[in-house]
Image (tube, rainbow, N blue to C red):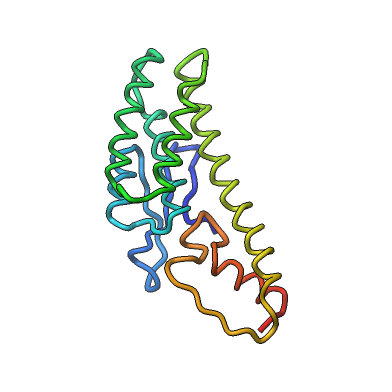
């Protein structure tokens, strides 16, 4: 189950509300950049990779909600939305990386606001898929360094909840377990 995902029908972001875990598993919905920034600031979503992808979806959601009929106005709105998202967690490297990547995509030539909206959703989806694949490859490589019976310790939020899916350091341990290692 992905910690962050896009509902294409409603054009909304769905986040596992990590504040409620482990007692309950509920989804938290964000419809624009301001709601997304509040979710990041409020720790609904945690973990660098998950925060970055959430910010990317936040810009996509803002674009989809925009009433701007001209590309320059939509791009200006996205710049403002990016500033709101950046302020949500000023030390989050993945957040800034994701916002910068989305803004680069927004600046590329496109025919219409609708085309830009479609491009940004596709770019955020691509980033989410890349995160899953990167973490899966990292897990496979890391598990190769783990011998059966090893004692391991890791620090910080490194499991599947910290990423879109799979996890970083804990993903290596998970993969080793799936390979039958104890």
At x 47% / y 53%, what residue is drawn? 49
Q: Is residue 13 left or right of residue 73?
A: right
Q: Quadrant of the N terminus?
A: bottom right
Residue 58 sits above or below residue 142 on the image: above
Examine the rendered structure and indicate whether residue 149 appears above or below residue 74: below
Position in image of residue 120 (x %, y %): 49, 30
Q: Quadrant of residue 179?
A: bottom right
Where in the figure is residue 47, as x and y percent of width and height? Answer: 42, 58
In terms of depth relative to the viewer, which is nearer, 77 or 107?
Answer: 107
Q: Where is residue 102? Give x, y as percent.
A: 46, 33
Image height check: is 66 above or below 162?
above
Instruction: Please identify the quarter of the rendering in which residue 95 is found.
Output: top left
Q: Quadrant of the C terminus?
A: bottom right
In front of the other: 57 or 95? 95
Farthest residue in the front direction? 145
Q: Residue at x 34, y 57 (%)?
A: 44
Q: Residue at x 48, y 56 (%)?
A: 3
């Amino acid at each position: 189950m992905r910690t962050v995902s896009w509902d294409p029908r409603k054009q909304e972001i769905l986040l596992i509300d990590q504040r409620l875990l482990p007692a309950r598993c509920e989804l938290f919905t964000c419809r624009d950049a301001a709601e997304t920034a509040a979710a990041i600031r409020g720790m609904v979503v945690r973990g660098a990779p998950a925060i970055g992808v959430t910010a990317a979806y936040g810009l996509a959601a803002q674009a989809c909600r925009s009433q701007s009929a001209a590309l320059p106005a939509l791009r200006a709105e996205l710049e403002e939305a990016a500033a709101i998202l950046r302020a949500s967690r000023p030390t989050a490297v993945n957040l800034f990386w994701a916002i910068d990547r989305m803004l680069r995509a927004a600046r590329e030539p496109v025919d219409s606001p609708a085309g830009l909206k479609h491009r940004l959703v596709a770019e955020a989806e691509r980033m989410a898929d890349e995160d899953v694949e990167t973490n899966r490859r990292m897990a496979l490589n890391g598990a190769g360094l783990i011998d059966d019976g090893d004692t391991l310790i890791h620090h910080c939020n490194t499991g599947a909840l910290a990423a879109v899916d799979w996890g970083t350091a804990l993903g290596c341990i998970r993969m080793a377990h799936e390979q039958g290692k104890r």
